[in-house]
Image (spheres, rainbow, N blue to C red):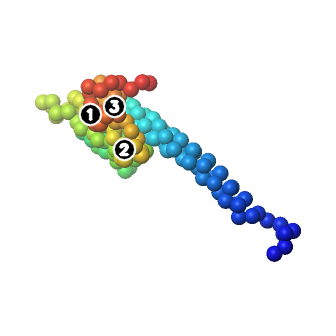
Amino acid sequence: MRRDQQGFSLIELLIVVAIILIIAAIAIPNLLRSRIAANQASAIGSCRTINTAEVSYASTYGVGYSSNLVQLGPPSTLMTTPSAAGLIDSVLAGGVKSGYTFSYTPALPDGAGRYQGYAVTANPTQVGVSGSAYYFTDQTYVIRGTTTGQASASDSPVAN
């Protein structure tokens, strides 16, 4: 074989591949942590959106709070109604957004059939992959969070 050929030797290619693998090993965990942080920020924002939508729903329709997230979602026609108020997007009304599952529970209705309270929990769809914190909010409009399991009204408020 001739020594004056142009190109890379096998050793040079292996060194380049090793360097790329080292950089990937450093970068990928940071990327995953960034994605978790973004999903958690989105979950807090969605809880805030639900709280704001509930205030609007209760004041607009005068029937108390909604009985589920679908009632806060977009209408199928141009006309909004108490069963489709158009206050949140269809993704959030479906209960799953940005790696979090949102569960809505209305309080027991009063004598007139109006819901005077609600509770929303936001749980990661895959703990440690889509998020590591759990969130809770209710008619007090305080968003609470924990990293130890299902969040409740007794957990600490999250920082703004």
The earlier-in-sequence mark between 1 and 3 is 1
Q: What residue type is labelled 2?
A: Val
Identify the secondary structure beneath mark 2.
loop
The one of 3 and 91 positioned closer to us in this rendering? 3
Which percent across, then down, holds residue 143? 35, 28
| On screen, residue 5 above or below 33 | below
Q: Residue beneath label 3, please?
A: 146
Marks 1 and 3 in Cβ contact (< 8 Å): no
Answer yes or no: is residue 57 visible.
no
Residue at the spot of label 2 = 127
Q: Where does residue 11 sit, x and y in percent of width and height? A: 70, 61
Mark before the other along the chain sequence, 2 or 1: 1
Look at 38% across and 49% down and name the residue there: 77
Residue 13 drawn at (x, y percent): 70, 60
Distance between mark 2 and mark 1 Cα atoms: 21 Å
Amino acid type indicated by mark 1 = Ala
Do the residues bearing badges 2 and 1 touch, measured as CB atoms within 8 Å?
no
Pick the quarter of the image with the N terminus. bottom right
Dot 2 crowding, Cα within 10 Å, few <14, some 14–19, many 20+: some
- Of the residues under marks 2 and 3, which one precedes in the sequence? 2
Residue 66, placed above or below residue 5 = above
Point out the frontmost of discs 2 and 1: 2
Quadrant of res 51 = top left
Q: Give the distance between the C-alpha atoms of the residues marked 1 and 3, in whole angstroms.
A: 16 Å
Instruction: Kindly identify which numbered label has been placed on residue 73.
Output: none
Q: In which quarter of the image is the C terminus?
A: top left
Residue 86: image quadrant is top left
Q: Give me the disc on residue 119.
A: 1
**Position of residue 101 measured from the top left corner of the image (x, y, whole percent):** 34, 44
